Amino acid sequence: MLVKGMASRKPVVLQIAGYKNSGKTTLAEYLVRYFSARGLKVGVIKHDGHEFDVDHAGTDSWRMTQAGAAAVAIASARRTAVIEEQGRSLDELLARFGEADLVIVEGFKREAYPKIVMLRSPEDLSLIRECTGIAAVVCWEALHASDAIQELGAAAAGVPGFKLGESARLAEWLAGQIGDAQHKK
């Protein structure tokens, strides 16, 4: 299921979907460390449902934005940042990650890439019905993975369930999936 894009040298894309405080960022951080340590070039795209600001009052880039610039780039020998005064779709963002082997996407739950769904409580089971392409389910102690898999119904064939805290086991399973994808290139 994680093979989308591998044949044309696009990165493997893996989404992590869940409601607020479900553990998405903690899992994403673990997976970045795990796959980076194994030599993969990992990118991350995070969706923010609120307005955010990475530019701060008084900086040169902030001054250019305040002056009316539609985009500002800041570049050094080691890092580049581009700040645009417009939103981008996930596919537009992914187009910029062509050098990555794996892109972990936090959020964008309505997109069609393979997803790990994080479920904190039984009330979160509604997320199962909102998402497509569920590759795995991670559940907090208040919820059993079997309940989430049952909620998936017929779509549950082959979807593994993990407990929160089983990040190593989940990462090993994902590594097998990604390895299979790379062999099919």
Image (cartoon, rainbow, N blue to C red):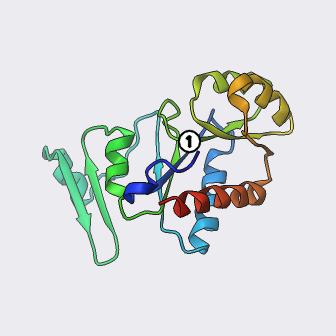
Q: Position of residue 98 (x, y in %)?
A: 35, 59
* In the image, residue 122 above or below residue 95: above
| Frontmost residue, 136 versus 181 | 181
Residue type indicated by callout 1: Pro
| Frontmost residue, 88 versus 39 | 39
Whether residue 30 is visible to the viewer of this picture, yes or no, is no
Q: Position of residue 185 (x, y in %)?
A: 47, 60
Q: Position of residue 120 (x, y in %)?
A: 75, 34
Q: Residue at x 43, y 51 (%)?
A: 5
Q: Residue at x 32, y 40 (%)?
A: 88
Q: Where is residue 10, by image quadrant?
A: bottom left
Q: Residue furthest front?
A: 184
Count of marks, rendered view: 1
| Frontmost residue, 36 versus 13 | 13
* In the image, residue 79 above or below residue 121: below
Q: Which residue is mark 1?
A: 114
Whether residue 129 is visible to the viewer of this picture, yes or no, is yes
Q: Residue at x 20, y 54 (%)?
A: 72
